[in-house]
Image (cartoon, rainbow, N blue to C red):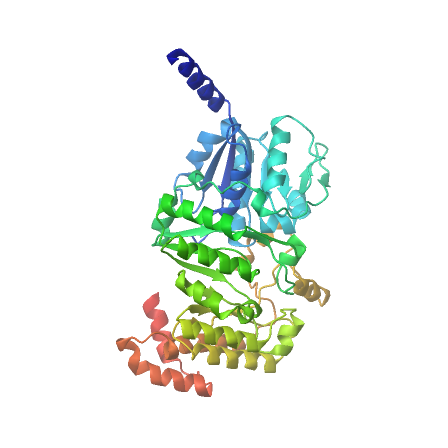
Amino acid sequence: MTNFASVKVYIRATCMQQRKKIVLYNPKAVFFDMPLALLAVGSALDTSRYEVIIIDGRIESHIDELLALHLPDALCFGISVITGAPLNDALKTSKTVKKHFPGLPVIWGGWHASLFPEQVLADESCVDIVVRGQGEITFTELVANLSNGLDLDSVKGICYRKKDGTVMCNPLRTLSAVEAFNRIDYSFIDVETYFHNKGNRQFDIITSAGCLFRCAFCADPFVYGRKFSALPAKRLADDIEYYYHKYAFTDLNFQDESFFTYSQRVHDLTTELIQRKIKLSWAATMRADQGAKLSDETWRLCKASGLRRLLIGVESGSQEMLDTLNKDIKLEQVYACAEKCRELGIAVIFPFIIGFPGESDESAEATARVMKELKSMSPLFETPAFHFRPYPGSRLIHEAEAGGYRLPATTAAWAEFDFVDSVGPWVSKEKAAYFDALGFYLKLAYGRRRLLLLPFRFIARYRCRYNFFRFPLAMNIFKQLSN
């Protein structure tokens, strides 16, 4: 019996030694959300055949040493890439990998790769393959073909460079049901390190893929074709309970594009969390139309289960502009959500966007008015205003291009997108200064009461009420103190 057990241990150890290594990299950025995209594709692989190594450029201080340690016997090197500053690090790292390991397949996935697969492959010889859209099945098939030395022409959802240099794009893969995938394995990362960098025990999770909606400024409709799939409530509650006991987090951050798409799912999930006595706080995204249709009972369950904050995108205070943007919400629904959250003591971030192409002064004034009204409703509300950013893949940017606006023409230019005038020509300096001052004084006027700031509150409310932002002494002082 002992000999048989020893043989089994030997066989298992031998198999583990023969596992092929998959190295995945998350580029440097200024935030510390857990690398959910890499965790998802890594968890989809058969760990008896593959050893998944995740290196996070935001966390690790000795990246070159880790690459040198793991890449010599790796099957491939994958990076999740988003547009802007992280793209710079993705390019730099890919070039380093290709320089030292020229025969190693370098694979890009993520938003930027999904939007510009052919451009990436044409511009950058350091990238060999691009995964488009949902990656779990595509990456699994891709890794299997690489492992077995097979051609890639049968793998849906990828673009790749053939040996003769030509770029081949295979048919896209339709969105798969997320409940068919394995539970995400967070042991690929050191979860405690992320807690430390966040400054609290906040656990990140994504429970759905895609989005059903058609906002003209968003790339989601282009990437996922307005398809949506979500984990059922019972399965999701099981997963949360498992992670909760394993990692002892106190806050849960749902990273879904549209967490409240199915109200019954939210109702059932919050009921499960309460019944299982899972004590935590949580935050999620919500569309105003979803919140307006949510029953009072489900709202109460959300609060009772720990809902602390929502992000409800308003985008514009002009109903005409909202209709132009295909936002498919009504301002009345925004106010209904705000009233319910004020009643329940739930914090809300209501983001706005200024400077949409063709936006009138009247539309901008309406946005300022709605920002003031929402912010004054509760000190738990925030109403930040962002400049319109011409995000690739959206309907709005295609229209802007038709009107003469030019997006960056190369991958390298996209990598500098965060460091140039990327807000486009639709926001004047005067409008930008006005909304900058408005945002500051609204926060000062209606934010949480602090004894030290009370003398400034009255002046700030006066400024907001009468749009008087000349000589913003307080704003300049606070900016100097924060530097």
Nearer to me, 179 or 212: 179
Q: Nearer the viewer, residue 22 or 305?
A: 305
- Could you tell me which residue is drawn at 61 percent across and 31 percent down? 144
For this rendering, which residue is in front, 268 or 463?
268
* Residue 217 picture quarter: bottom right
Residue 309 pos. (x, y %)? 43, 64
Q: Is residue 355 visible?
A: yes
Question: Quadrant of residue 479 in the image?
Answer: bottom left
In this view, the residue farthest toward the top is: 3
Q: Is residue 435 left or right of residue 219?
A: left
Judged left or right of residue 337, residue 426 is right
In the orientation shown, which residue stands out farthest toward the left? 451
Instruction: Let me know if residue 470 appears in the view.
Output: no
Q: How many marks?
A: 0
The quadrant of the rendering that contains the N terminus is: top left
Position in image of residue 367 (x %, y %): 54, 78
**What residue is shown at x 66% (from left), y 65% (from top)?**
396
* Relative to 171, residue 388 above or below: below
Nearer to the camera, 4 or 325: 4
Does residue 80 sit above or below 454 in this rendering? Answer: above
Name the side, left or right, on which 431 lies relative to 213: left
The location of residue 32, given as percent across then percent down, is 42, 51
Q: For the C terminus, which image quadrant?
A: bottom left
Q: Position of residue 2 (x, y in %)?
A: 37, 13
- 36 in relation to 321, above or below: above
> Could you tell me which residue is drawn at 61 percent across and 61 percent down?
218
